[in-house]
Image: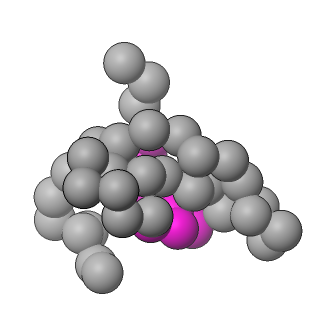
Amino acid sequence: MNIASGTLTGIFAGVNADGALLLRDSRGQMHTITAGDVGLL
């Protein structure tokens, strides 16, 4: 999934072995974030 032109919101679910952020969205789908800007609410 490429969301370079949008926003993805969810709950922090950890960091994988490669150091990527793991984010669980409101539907329960897990996303691996390897680059981008992160904001905390």
Q: What stretch is highlighted in magenta?
A: 31-38
Quarter in which the C terminus is drawn: top left
x and y, in percent, of residue 6 in the image = 16, 58
Q: Is residue 33 magenta?
A: yes
Query: Which quadrant holds residue 16?
Result: bottom right
What residue do we see at 36% from left, 64% from top?
29
Query: Which quadrant holds residue 28?
Result: bottom left
Q: Viewer-proximal residue, 36 or 33?
A: 33
x and y, in percent, of residue 26 in the image = 26, 46
Q: Viewer-proximal residue, 36 or 31?
A: 31
x and y, in percent, of residue 37 in the image = 43, 46
Main SS, magenta residues: loop
Specify whether residue 21 is in view.
yes
Residue farthest to the left, as pictured: 6
What residue do we see at 26% from left, 68% from top?
4
Quarter in which the N terminus is drawn: bottom left
